[in-house]
């Protein structure tokens, strides 16, 4: 279906179920939502970050994960991130009429995160954080997982993502600023461009 501008208005939704011997994951995303989020992974801080992604990206997002938390949070976070990336890729469709590129800078007190995204169809991640971060946030979240979340998401979403935190002290602030900036950059890149027709690439495909 198209509106009066000729821009595609069909629902842009993705739904992925991922089941392994370690985890069971369900992710649903609507790119044209209003920021309604229902998240339950069993990892409190990760839930908090996924809420930031949905709220600030204005994505309707449902995430339900059951994982082997008796071991640690790694498999739960990794498999959820893979499913999240796959759901975003499905929701983007062939990317016709989208802006394709997006960037955002978000401060959180003493920390600043800068994110640029290209819905390129080619997975690539550049990621940097301040050295000397605290190793844990709360009892469950290993701060080295932030990069792994982004790696997993990018691999399945098939996007190019640059994330940089030039400064910051508090680990909670450093990570949360990244998710807020990611949300805003993804929102900008996935928005429909009223002047665009077709796929935004000289190749004709993304």
Image (cartoon, rainbow, N blue to C red):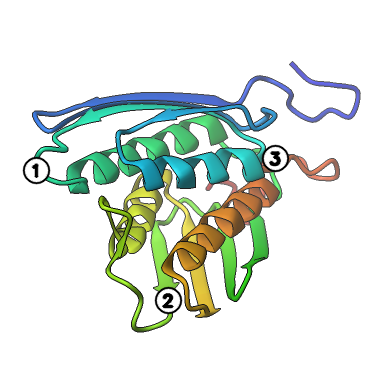
Q: CA distance from mark 2 to mark 3?
A: 37 Å
Looking at the rendered structure, the secondary structure element under dot 2 is: loop
Q: Earlier in the sequence, mark 2 or mark 3?
A: 2
Question: At 46% from the left edge and 38% from the top edge, which residue is drawn?
Answer: 89
Q: CA distance from mark 1 to mark 2?
A: 27 Å
Question: At 57% from the left edge and 59% from the top edge, which residue is drawn?
Answer: 117
Nearest to viewer (mark 3 / mark 1)? 1
Whole-percent x, y for residue 185 in the image: 63, 55
Q: Is residue 69 above or below residue 202?
A: above
Which residue is identified by label 2?
A: 129
Q: Earlier in the sequence, mark 1 or mark 2?
A: 1
Question: At 48% from the left edge and 37% from the top edge, which residue is drawn?
Answer: 88
Which residue is identified by label 1?
A: 71
User: Left or right: where does residue 163 sit relative to residue 146?
Assistant: right
The N terminus - image quarter: top right
Which residue is identified by label 3?
A: 198
Q: Is residue 111 above or below residue 10?
A: below
User: Left or right: where does residue 176 sit relative to residue 196?
Assistant: left
């Amino acid at each position: 279906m198209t509106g009066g501008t000729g821009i595609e208005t069909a629902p842009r939704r993705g739904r992925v179920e991922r089941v392994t011997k370690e985890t069971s994951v369900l992710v649903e995303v609507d790119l044209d939502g209003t920021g309604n989020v229902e998240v339950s992974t069993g990892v409190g801080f990760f839930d908090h970050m996924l809420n930031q992604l949905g709220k600030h990206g204005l994505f309707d997002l449902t995430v339900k994960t059951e994982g082997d938390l008796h071991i640690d949070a790694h498999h739960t976070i990794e498999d959820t991130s893979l499913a999240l990336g796959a759901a975003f890729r499905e929701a983007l469709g062939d990317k016709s009429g989208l802006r394709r590129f997006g960037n955002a800078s978000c401060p959180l007190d003493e920390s600043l995160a800068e994110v640029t995204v290209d819905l390129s169809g080619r997975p690539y991640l550049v990621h940097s954080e301040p050295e000397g971060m605290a190793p844990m946030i709360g009892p469950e979240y290993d701060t080295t997982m932030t990069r792994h979340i982004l790696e997993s998401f990018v691999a399945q979403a098939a996007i190019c993502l640059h994330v940089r935190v030039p400064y910051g002290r508090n680990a909670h602030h450093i990570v949360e600023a990244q998710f807020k900036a990611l949300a805003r950059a993804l929102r900008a890149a996935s928005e429909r461009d009223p002047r665009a027709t077709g796929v935004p690439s000289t190749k004709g495909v993304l």
